[in-house]
Every structure is written in structure tokens, then in C-alpha cells.
Image: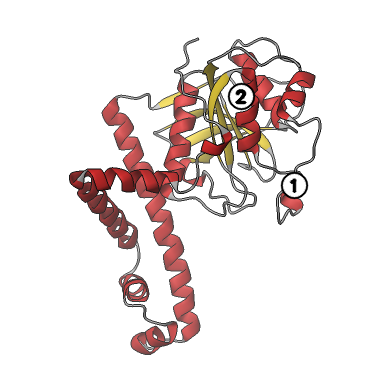
Amino acid sequence: MVIVSFPMMLPDELFSETDVNTSRKTNAESDPLHHMLIQENEQELLRNSLYSLSKQARSLLTSFALEDATPEELAFRYEMNKSNVYNILSRSRAKANDERFRCEVDQHIRERRRLGLPSTHQLQPPCYSRPYALISILIGEVLRMAGEPDWTLTNLMGISGDAFRLNVTNGCNWRGISTFDWSYSTYRTLERLGLSGTCFGRPGRASISPEHQIDMLSTIQDTIVRSLPVIIWNMEINEFGFVYGYNDEERTISYLSYNRKIRKFQYEQLGRTGQEPALFIAAIRQRVASPASER
């Protein structure tokens, strides 16, 4: 099995919410043409997202966003109750946001077609002998599928730290009773195993942008094409699972949950389930060094 190599990322270099926008800004500053294309693309996305709204909703939302008009002013201008203004603004922003995500996915699929990348790829659903209660279990499954040595669960739990700690995030609630910084834990584990990989998702992130969603989708597609599933948390509330297939025509990913249920989710649902904690994904690439000493 051939897997493309990616450099190992240390915990301090983990992907953050601002990395995509920062990268785009840096490129724009060094390339005026690139900056112009970004502006045109963002304006087009804005126009497309507002196009799906009614004329009144589009006018009201535009006035609220661009003119800094207050709900009271909008209620007087459009001769309606202030409560109706709030309702229209809320529904319009949600609908426009949905449209923005859809447009980004459309653009992503068109780009994949232009590059001649596979439009669909399905792996065999991963087989396992125990529930996906700990990230060490999922890492072990991916290592087995990658043809790595048969790491025992005991070893992996020791390497990852699962065996020694209960990590709880700030503001922990019933949906995340034992959640923690899996990106940090995963990168440290892969580093100790001598493997390369990539993650998305840190504690405290309340939402994702369309650009982040496409970044996750690209990671999922690239990893599956290389015959490995992607580890995912919170595609279903408060559980681990695997993404093992995708289909650009259907715009769906195939998901296997800890209870062995197979489901399909739309691309636009990635990271937008409205549940807490936010989505986390981890993709293992290939060996880049010898494992650290067992000591």
C-alpha cells in the first residue's frame, strides 16, 4: 500500500481556526492578482448566498449588515413588528449561511473534477472487536489496516496517555464528560510511534467556517483514496467513529459508529451538527521514523 508522506506536525504547530485565513492573507499580500481573485470569489459567494433569499429578506439583511440599521429602524422602514424583524434576520442569516457552505462545496467538487481526482471511493467498513470508547482503539485499527506492527491496546493506551488520565475540558457537560484535546494527544502519539498525520479540532472552537469544512473534507478524501479511514469524533453526538468512504455525486461520506451502525452524512454536515463539543478528525499518513523506545 502506497501512502503519500506528510511532514510530522508538532503539537505547537497544530492547525488553528485562523490558519486558513492567515495563509490566504499572506498570499494576497505577496500577490496582488491572488488578492483580487480572492475578493472576487468572496463577493460571488456573498451574492450567491443572498440570492436564495426573498427580496424583502435580502433587503432587510443587507440594510442590517451594511447600513448598521437597528431592528427598530428596520421595523419602522418596512412597517412591521420588531419581533418579525428579528425572525426574518435570524432565518435569513441561517439560510444565507447554509447557502455559503453549499457554494463552497460546489466549488470544491468542481475543482476536484478539473484536477481529475476520484469522484468516489469506498473502503470496506472497518472491523473491530471492541467499542470505540478511546482514541487509542481507533488508532490501533488504522495501524492494523496500514500494515503496521500489531500494537497492543495496552501499549497504545500507555503511549497516548489514555491509561493514566481523565482529561476534561473547561465547561464540560454531559455531551463531553471525558473529552479532551485529542489533536495534542494524537500528534504526540503519532510522534512517539514514528508516524506522520494530521488533525483538525481543538477545545474551545464553537463553530467552523466553510473554508475549514473544505479543509476537513479534503483530508477525508485524500486519506480514503490512500486506503485508510479517518478517525472522527462527534459526527454522532459524543462518540468516536470512522469515515471510510465518500461520493462527490451524492455529496455524502460513509460513517461507521462505535455501535457498528453505518450511516451517510452530507458534506455540508461536517462540523455543523449543532452539537458540542465540536467536530474532531485525525488522519494517519505513513511511517517517517522508528518508534520511540518502549521505555
As drawn, 44 above or below 188: below
Q: Residue at x 60, y 37 (%)?
A: 183
Q: Amino acid at mark 2?
A: Leu
Q: Amino acid at mark 1?
A: Val
Q: CA distance from mark 1 to mark 2?
A: 22 Å
The residue that disc 1 covers is 168
Q: Which mark is residue 62?
A: none
| Residue 193: % across, % down | 64, 19
Observer able to see residue 126: no
The residue that disc 2 covers is 190
Q: Residue at x 26, y 57 (%)?
A: 43
Q: Secondary structure at mark 1?
A: loop
Between 11 and 216, the one lying in front of the other is 11
As drawn, 79 above or below 201: below
Question: Dot 2, how many residues are within 10 Å of its Cα: few (below 14), some (14-19), or many (20+)?
Answer: many
As drawn, 210 above or below 82: above
Q: Secondary structure at mark 2?
A: helix
| Residue 166: % across, % down | 79, 40
| Residue 147: % across, % down | 60, 10
| Residue 54: % across, % down | 34, 68
Q: Residue at x 59, y 17 (%)?
A: 194
Query: Relative to 41, is 151 on the left or the right?
Result: right
Q: Residue at x 34, y 42 (%)?
A: 106
Q: Quadrant of residue 233?
A: top right
